[in-house]
Image: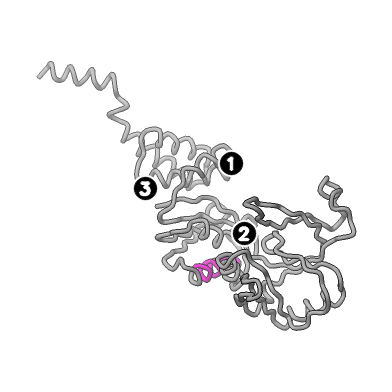
Amino acid sequence: MRIKLFVLAIFLLLVPDLVFCAVDASKSYLVGVEAYEGCDYKKAVRFLENSIEAGLSGNKLVESYCKLYFCAFELKDQKRLSKYESLCSYKNLTLHLTFEELKSVEEENALIIKDILKKRLEKSTFKKHSIEVIKKGNRIVYIVSIFKVNNPEKAIDLISKSGQLQLSLLDDESNLMNALKGNIPKDCKILYQIQERNNQILKIPFLVKGDIWNINNMINNTKIHIDKSYNTPNIIIKLNSDGTELLGNITANNIKKRLAIILDNQILSAPVIQGQINTGTFLINGDGIEEVKDMALLLSTKSYPIPSTILAIFNE
């Protein structure tokens, strides 16, 4: 018996980490979670990473990656952001979404955003979902869980995009090349149109004038239309009376000028105004039926009142 105890004592002295690894992992995890919930992100990073090194596993490991991603975002730690983003995988998708300008006191905006999220998900193929709203310091965070996700990129786009549809005139008189070098005319900005040609993604720059009209709240309905001549899908946008009046005034006063149609700061198209449009109806072209369906879904719900930021993505 003495020999057995002696051997065990030597074993414990030589390899203590093997014995206490699980205890240390669990303890470090709990301390890290407590620090995370108290917004002490530096301490949370230290203890959560210690717990992972000590052998944390299962759902707690996934939750640690999520919390570490959130901490890295708050600490502006680009190295850790890249690291923990790459460790995320998808089965049941959960996103932590926040809005930089939304504080916990703005309950009206918080409810509007939750309602927008709910409507987007209910109109999509992601029927099985849950939305939890929590306060983190003075920030509101939306925890959106979607179950049995086959297309995570589509789900992320649906949740994170603002869905802000705008109209603006292009500045075709100023020198675009000078603007790209940093000499941007007053009250103008550069936006891009994304096109795919010969399996290459092209970013085409446009110089947009300062007057930008937000028309999301003026959309009466959207309809998907297939152009039989070219077999291409489009979205028909029908505006309400206010939108019809606005579009009529813009087009009547700017004949032969180009009108940019913008979604989330990306130019969709910039047709030349040939005459006044007094029907309140216009088309948005799409590259494929799935893209058009996704765009129509975004436009059929209200846009977020303020820009959104994804803090973390992980699977349960």
Marker disc for residue 75: 1
Q: Are marks 1 and 3 in contact (CB under 8 Å)?
A: no
Q: Is 272 in the magenta?
A: no
State which quadrant residue 140 falls in: bottom right
Marker disc for residue 102: 2
State which quadrant residue 302 falls in: bottom right
Q: Identity of the amino acid at label 2?
A: Leu
Indicate the position of residue 283 as horizontal and vertical percent values. Answer: 69, 74
Q: Indicate which disc, 2 or 1, sits on the residue closer to the N terminus.
A: 1
Marker disc for residue 59: 3
Going 51% across and 39% down the picture, which residue do you hit? 83
Residue 133 falls left or right of residue 243: left
Q: Are marks 3 and 2 in contact (CB under 8 Å)?
A: no
Going 79% across and 68% down the picture, which residue do you hit? 259
Q: Indicate which disc, 1 or 3, sits on the residue closer to the N terminus.
A: 3
Q: Quadrant of the N terminus?
A: top left
Q: Identity of the amino acid at label 1?
A: Leu
SS label for mark 2: strand
Instruction: Calculate the distance from the C-alpha at mark 1 to the C-alpha at mark 3.
Output: 24 Å
Secondary structure predominantly adopted by residues drawn in magenta? helix
Going 49% across and 61% down the picture, which residue do you hit? 133
Q: Identity of the amino acid at label 3?
A: Asn
Q: For label 1, count other residues whose C-alpha is less than 10 Å away and answer few (under 14), some (14-19) or many (20+).
A: some
Q: Which residues are magenta?
A: 109-121
| Mark in the foreground, 1 or 3 | 3
Residue furthest right in the image: 173
Q: How is the image coloured?
A: one colour
SS label for mark 1: helix
SS label for mark 3: helix
| Mark in the foreground, 3 or 2 | 3
Instruction: Calculate the distance from the C-alpha at mark 3 to the C-alpha at mark 2.
Output: 30 Å
Q: Is 117 in the magenta?
A: yes
